[in-house]
């Protein structure tokens, strides 16, 4: 056994074994010292490690300011982002809650509208069931209104027809035809035509169109009935007598003066328009007149019957 590294000084060997105990004791002592040295070394190593760890733990690592600011800004942004995320999440949750509330409100509204529609449908059904009766009632009311309106209009028309003016020229005129020698009608024949109102109220806005046809040639031209060229206006003709007279003229005479023989027919013809005193709408009444001033039994039929259909009131 090599124990030189334990620093043990071995005694010199002797021929006897008297010093074995001393040797063993020396070996035991050396081993004990070596063991204590190892324990002390290990204890020292452990203390050094603990002290070094403590120093390392207490040591402050200092980084450049740019790096520190960068990491600080990243930390702040992360914090802001976290707050934003929390707000966004809260808002989204609130939006979901509001949306659910709106959905429930709309469902409630739809339910109410559905009930109203059901009620309206029932009312519509009742109205449809009642429609025939309502139509009959409406038709009856309309017929009654039409009947009342017709009755009123008939009464109004009857009253107006009964109270209206009626203008006529006397039958069998006996008037004088004379020559006009001066004035705008120089060279024409003239007569005064009486127009009488046989009605109960005055004739208003009276306008007389008349002409004297003298001789066979002019009388024959009455077919067809031509509009007289001469007119005279008398605004009002009241009922009663004596009737007013209206001057009627002939066309210019060929000879410049009137020369009538027994065989020369003479006819006065024309029409009169007028209305009544009652409220609008104002009807227009018309008197058509035609009378022979000279009648000769020997006249041919076309001359004698020229006025047959030209005396009426409308």
Image (cartoon, rainbow, N blue to C red):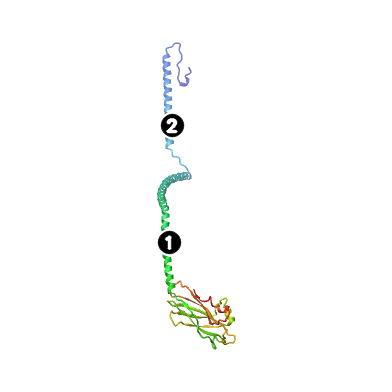
Q: Is residue 279 visible?
A: no
Which of 177 and 48 lies nearest the eye of the viewer? 177
> Number of marks in the image?
2
Asked if labels 1 and 2 touch by Cβ distance under 8 angstroms, the answer is: no
Horizontal side of 190 relative to 242 (left or right) equals right
Q: Residues within 10 Å of mark 1 (few under 14, many from 20)?
A: few
Q: Is residue 154 visible?
A: yes
Q: Mark 1 = which residue? A: 143
User: For the residues carrying marks 2 and 1, which lies nearer the camera in this image?
Assistant: 1
Q: Position of residue 207 (x, y in %)?
A: 49, 78
Above/below status of 35 relative to 259: above
Q: Position of residue 122 (x, y in %)?
A: 40, 50
Q: Please name the residue shown 47% across and 21% down the image.
A: 5
> SS of the residue at dot 1?
helix
Q: Position of residue 203 (x, y in %)?
A: 45, 77
Q: Position of residue 280 (x, y in %)?
A: 45, 72
Above/below status of 9 relative to 236: above
- Most extreme residue toward the bottom is 181
- Most extreme residue toward the top is 16
Which of 94 and 71 lies nearest the eye of the viewer? 94
Q: Mark 2 = which residue? A: 49
Horizontal side of 69 relative to 185 (left or right) equals left
Image disc number at residue 280: none
> SS of the residue at dot 2?
helix
Instruction: Residue 58: name its quadrant.
Output: top left
C-alpha distance separating marks 2 and 1: 125 Å
Q: Please name the residue shown 43% across and 14% down the image.
A: 20
Q: Residues within 10 Å of mark 2 (few under 14, many from 20)?
A: few
Answer with mark 2 or mark 1, whichever residue precedes in sequence.
Answer: 2
Which of 108 and 131 lies nearest the eye of the viewer? 131
């Amino acid at each position: 056994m090599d124990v030189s590294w334990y620093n043990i000084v071995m005694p010199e060997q002797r021929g006897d074994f008297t010093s074995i105990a001393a040797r063993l004791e020396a070996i035991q002592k050396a081993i004990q010292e070596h063991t204590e040295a190892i324990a002390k070394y290990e204890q020292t190593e452990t203390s050094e490690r603990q002290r070094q760890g403590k120093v390392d733990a207490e040591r402050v690592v200092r980084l450049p300011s740019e790096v520190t600011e960068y990491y600080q800004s990243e930390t702040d942004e992360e914090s802001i982002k976290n707050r934003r995320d929390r707000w966004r999440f809260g808002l989204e949750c609130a939006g979901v809650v509001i949306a659910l509330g709106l959905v429930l409100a709309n469902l409630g509204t739809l339910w109410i509208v559905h009930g109203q529609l059901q009620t309206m449908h029932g009312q519509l059904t009742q109205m449809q069931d009642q429609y025939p009766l309502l139509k009959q009632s409406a038709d009856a009311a309309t017929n009654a209104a039409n009947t009342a309106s017709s009755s009123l209009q008939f009464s109004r028309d009857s009253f107006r027809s009964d109270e209206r003016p009626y203008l006529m020229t006397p039958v069998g005129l006996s008037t004088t035809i004379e020559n006009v020698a001066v004035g705008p009608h120089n060279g024409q024949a003239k007569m005064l035509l009486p127009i009488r109102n046989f009605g109960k109220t005055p004739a208003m806005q009276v306008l007389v169109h008349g002409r004297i046809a003298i001789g066979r040639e002019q009388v024959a031209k009455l077919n067809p009935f031509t509009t007289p060229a001469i007119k005279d206006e008398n605004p009002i003709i009241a009922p009663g007598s004596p009737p007013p007279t209206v001057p009627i003229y002939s066309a210019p005479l060929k000879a410049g003066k009137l020369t009538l023989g027994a065989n020369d027919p003479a006819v006065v013809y024309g029409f009169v328009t007028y209305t009544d005193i009652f409220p609008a709408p104002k009807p227009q009444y018309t008197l058509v007149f035609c009378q022979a001033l000279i009648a000769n039994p020997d006249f041919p039929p076309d001359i004698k019957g020229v006025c047959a259909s030209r005396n009426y009131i409308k």
